[in-house]
Amino acid sequence: MADQLLSTVSHHSSVPDNYVRPESQRPRLHEVVRDADIPTIDLGSLDVSRVIAQVGDACSSFGFFQVVNHGVPDELMLSLMAVASEFFRLPPEEKAKHYSDDPAKKMRLSTSFNIRKETVRNWRDYLRLHCYPLEEFVPGWPSNPASFKEVVSGYCREVRQLGFRLLGLISLSLGLEEEYMVKVLGEQEQHMAVNYYPKCPEPELTYGLQAHTDPNALTILLQEPKVAGLQVLKDGKWIAVNPQPNAYVINIGDQLQALSNGRYRSVCHRAVVNSDTDRMSVASFLCPCNSAVISPPEKLVGDGSPAVYRSYTYEEYYSKFWSRNLDDEHCLELFKASDAQEA
Ligand code: OGA
Ligand code: NI
């Protein structure tokens, strides 16, 4: 029910018990590394071979990077954030129209991650939209704020282009032909999560979104320019991702880890909350079509490097992902090739 939403309450003076993590699972914010950022790559650079090398390095070491000069107009990024924050400020009865906790719904406003399954909640509300093909889904999107459909659909088109360009660079960085990933992933779905993390009186006790990897192929995240919250796991330490103006945060999802035969990493990340300000982020997910067969390219499988994962369809993977808890082991572990498991 919509009264589960955090954004219907104007002020929280403490964190309710069902959001409090057990002591051993808390964020330990004082241990987070704040001065070792993920790489930033200038997509406007004319030195394309250098860009490809930077992409390859970032994907294999961090699984994350930021991009600047990426071609999505600054004004569009700003208007998207503006319309998204306007949406979360709508009156509760207006938001209630869109509320659902059914993960199968193609447009829904929800809270936490999957409240039907989880025992401790996350300090997050989110609007989740399917975005491709736009003609199919836009009619079902919110029509309040009045500009929502137009702004969000324009944004989705631009981000899809950026995603395809990145998949090209990723393919090249693996020594594959530029079109390789785009071809294998088929007619890709595109999903969006508009995340709203209200300010939280006790950020040490809870998460905006607990540690997870993204089940899709590639994620393109727009963060608010001034409010940090995303953290990435590297060598056992949590690293804060410092937002940069007009940049996107890009991360490798589980499917690119599988398609790169484990060379590129779908890395654990989390969002933490803070007591000063609300934070918003907008994640765009490129997802293989359901029938896409995820199996490593021949070029990346050889004597020294056997296939790490068995072949599967994305449909199989996605249903497994949603049947688990977000903090269970890496979902890809369930798809290990039998030889690799024995080794
Ligand atoms: C996600 C995600 C991080 C953030 O939506 O999958 O990891 O900073 N979001 O909101
Ligand atoms: Ni994520």
Image (cartoon, helix red, strand yellow):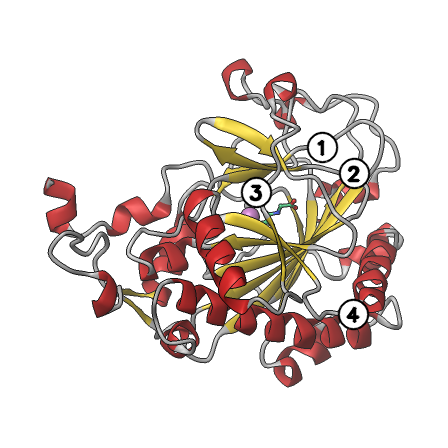
Which image quadrant for residue 181? bottom left
Which numbered disc, 1 or 2, marks the residue closer to the eye? 1
Callout 2 secondary element: loop
Name the residue at 84% across, 38% down.
9
Q: Are marks 2 and 4 in contact (CB under 8 Å)?
A: no
Query: Which residue is denoted by mark 2 in the rendering?
Result: 198
Query: Which residue is denoted by mark 3 in the rendering?
Result: 115
Name the amino acid type tagged 1.
Answer: Val
**Residue 289 at x, y = what percent?**
42, 74
Dot 1 crowding, Cα within 10 Å, few <14, some 14–19, many 20+: many
Q: Which image quarter is the C terminus in?
A: top left
Name the amino acid type tagged 2.
Answer: Pro
Of residues 290 and 9, which is closer to you in this image? Answer: 290
Which numbered disc, 3 or 4, marks the residue closer to the eye? 4
Query: Which residue is denoted by mark 4 in the rendering?
Result: 73
Query: Which residue is denoted by mark 1 in the rendering?
Result: 273
